Amino acid sequence: MIKLSYDVKKYRRDLLELVEADDIIIELGCHVGGTTKLISPGCKVIAVDNSPEAIDEMKNIENVNFIPGDVRLHEIIGEVYKITQSCDVLAIDLGGGYHPDTVFKVFYIWSSTFKPKHTAIRNRGLLEFFNSASACDEDYRTSTGYLESYHDSGIPPLIKEFDLWTPKLKR
């Protein structure tokens, strides 16, 4: 299941509905851990953020493996991949309202790599697009937290904005 929202309170409620005890959660855009603190009890959380404010704040949260860095960089996804090759829940909050194209690309690459059961995304632009789109008679749906049509395609060799990505991650 993929849940999309903009309001941070709704995003957190959606995320808590998806999380079960002992889940492995990858959280992209944890900032200072407001959401992380809600999801970390009873779960293993790998949280990633590139803001300097996050470093000191994230050290104090139990059950969290914090990785400072930009989620678009190959070495960051590689660092997470060394910890786990899959996750139960992928949580993405990269500024809420900014850059829906970047958020979608991050979702696509991280979800294609880690194959989550569920994903929660907070982004106004994606939500606006979804709510503005007309329904069509083509029915492409996923029951997982990633796009099933790209299940075996792996990481794209190059996305223009993410020029450090490579076709495969190796342990």
Image: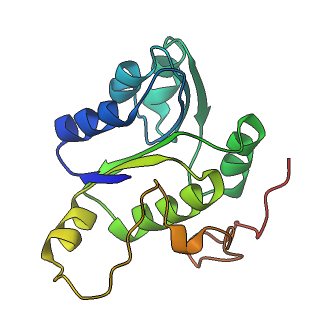
138, 12: nearer the viewer: 138
Q: Position of residue 124 (x, y in %)?
A: 21, 59
**Residue located 45% across and 19% down the image:** 57
Q: Is residue 47 left or right of residue 135?
A: right
Q: Position of residue 12 (x, y in %)?
A: 27, 34
- Taking the view exactly as shown, the residue that stands out farthest to the right is 171
- Taking the view exactly as shown, the residue that stands out farthest to the bottom is 137
| Quadrant of the rendered image containing residue 69 | top right
Which color scheme does this rendered protein use?
Answer: rainbow
Q: Position of residue 160 (x, y in %)?
A: 58, 79
| Quadrant of the rendered image containing residue 152 | bottom right
6, 19: nearer the viewer: 19
127, 70: nearer the viewer: 127
141 vs 75: above or below: below
Q: Is residue 114 left or right of residue 88?
A: right
**Residue located 41% across and 31% down the image:** 19
Q: Is residue 26 left or right of residue 140?
A: right
Q: Is residue 47 left or right of residue 133?
A: right
61 vs 168: above or below: above
Q: Position of residue 54 (x, y in %)?
A: 46, 28
**Residue located 41% across and 34% down the image:** 31
Q: How many marks?
A: 0
**Residue located 53% across and 25% down the image:** 55
